[in-house]
Amino acid sequence: METLKGIEYLYHATPSCYVRSIKKHGLGAKLPKKRFWDYEGTPYENITTGVFLATDECVAESYVEASDAFEELADNYMDRYDKELEIVVFRVAVSDLNMDLLEIDSNQQSDDEFDSTYFYRGVIPYNKLEIVEM
């Protein structure tokens, strides 16, 4: 993919409570009922597999942090477990992805100021992921 020239890693952020499922099934295998990337009314609204990826770990984390669904989940988590819900950021080497399954996120406003985000129409095995310390 031409736009990934020079990019070694892509990033995905998720609430820590989903890490166990990702370890078992892979990233993108089971989409949470609560979506943290808001795609209502877009081609991604009814996806059942796949994962959104960003070129920067802070961008990936900001999508989750800014989400009303995450805020609600974090509040429920605090009520239930009396502790803060963390956000975990994974990175995956671009070389470990099947480029035929990767596309530029068509819902994103495209401009020179922001790097593209991507949608990967497959499942990324847990052993291909690395947790990024933020």
Image: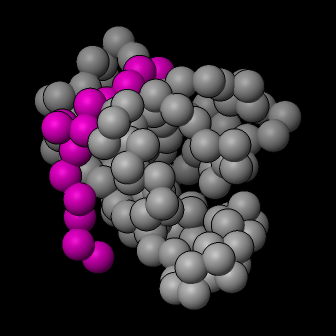
Q: Can residue 109 be spotted in the picture? A: no
| Range drawn in magenta | 120-134
In the rendered image, residue 125 lying in the magenta stretch gets the answer yes
Q: Nearer the viewer, residue 80 or 129?
A: 80
- Could you say where residue 78 lies in the image, as x and y percent from the top left? 62, 82
- Give me the residue at 26% from left, 51% from top: 91
Give how far across and how far down residue 48 sits, in percent.
62, 24
| Percent position of residue 4, x then y | 28, 36
Quarter of the C terminus within the rendering = bottom left
Which residue appears at 38% of the width and 53% of the height? Answer: 19
Q: Quadrant of residue 13?
A: bottom left
User: Camera-side residue: 127 or 134?
Assistant: 127
Residue 57: image x %, image y %?
34, 62
Q: Quadrant of residue 26?
A: top left
Residue at the (52%, 68%) spot, across then down: 62
In the orientation shown, which residue stands out farthest toward the front?
80
Image side of residue 47 versus residue 5, left or right: right
Q: Is residue 84 left or right of residue 19?
A: right
Which residue is the extreme one toward the right? 41
Front in this rendered view, residue 66 or 30: 30
Q: Tell me: residue 117, above or below residue 104.
A: below
Q: Is residue 21 visible?
A: yes
